[in-house]
Image (cartoon, rainbow, N blue to C red):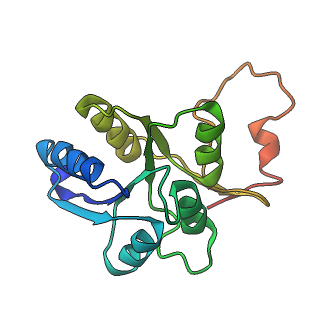
């Protein structure tokens, strides 16, 4: 994996967490790390710098992670609605994980973050990207991770083509 080629944007209002993630990223070879203290600054930075992956905290004071990802994915003025987003948080309740998923987050990582878990999530973003889809109420990576051949439920992928625009 050529982590040294990545441009990563860290979005977190906690300077210590940004420093920790920066050190972890540098340890795996990432050279181009940009920082933003909230979602507003991150959106401005995305307009100025070509970013490959965004790593964002969920809970921030001004324009938190969920609102940031919603704007990134759905705003007509979004600088890059397709950029992969890794959400990092200590608030990993089912409700918050679902809110992040529904906002269009690609991957989710709970604190405390380990080097191994960070590398695993980055590798998933790079080597196993999910197709983006657009529906009336959602835009982002396909939330379904697996194809289950013998699935017998009411929602079938073959029926989705009627309601989904694959971006």
x, y (%) of residue 59? Answer: 50, 50
Q: In this rendering, does residue 142 appear at all? A: no
Q: In this view, which residue lies farthest toward the top?
A: 150
Q: Residue shown at 23%/33% (left/top)?
A: 115
Count of labels shown?
A: 0
Task: Name the one closer to the observer, 59 or 26.
Answer: 59
Please state, as top left, top right, bottom left or bottom right, where the C terminus lies in the image.
Answer: bottom right
Please state, as top left, top right, bottom left or bottom right, where the N terminus lies in the image.
Answer: top left
Q: Residue shown at 49%/49% (left/top)?
A: 58
Left or right of 165? Residue 35 is: left
Place residue 147 in its image quadrant.
top right
Left or right of 140? Residue 13 is: left
Q: Is residue 3 above or below residue 72?
A: above
Q: Is residue 66 above or below residue 150?
A: below
Q: Residue shown at 47%/42% (left/top)?
A: 107
x, y (%) of residue 63? Answer: 53, 65
Q: In this rendering, does residue 46 appear at all? A: yes
Task: Name the one closer to the observer, 61 or 44.
Answer: 61
């Amino acid at each position: 994996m050529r982590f040294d080629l990545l441009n990563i944007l860290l979005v977190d209002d906690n300077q210590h967490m940004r420093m920790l993630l920066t050190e972890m990223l540098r340890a795996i070879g990432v050279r181009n790390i940009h920082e933003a203290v909230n979602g507003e600054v991150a959106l401005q930075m995305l307009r100025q710098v070509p970013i490959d992956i965004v790593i964002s905290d969920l809970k921030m004071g001004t324009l938190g992670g969920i609102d940031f990802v919603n704007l990134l994915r759905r705003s007509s003025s979004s600088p890059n609605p397709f950029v992969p987003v890794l959400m990092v948080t200590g608030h990993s309740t089912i409700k918050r994980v679902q809110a992040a998923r529904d906002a269009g987050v690609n991957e989710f990582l709970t604190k405390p973050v380990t080097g191994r878990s960070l590398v695993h999530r980055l590798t998933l973003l790079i080597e196993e990207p999910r197709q983006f889809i657009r529906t009336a109420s959602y835009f982002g990576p396909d939330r379904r991770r697996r194809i289950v051949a013998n699935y017998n439920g009411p929602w079938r992928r073959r029926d989705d083509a009627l309601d989904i625009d694959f971006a």
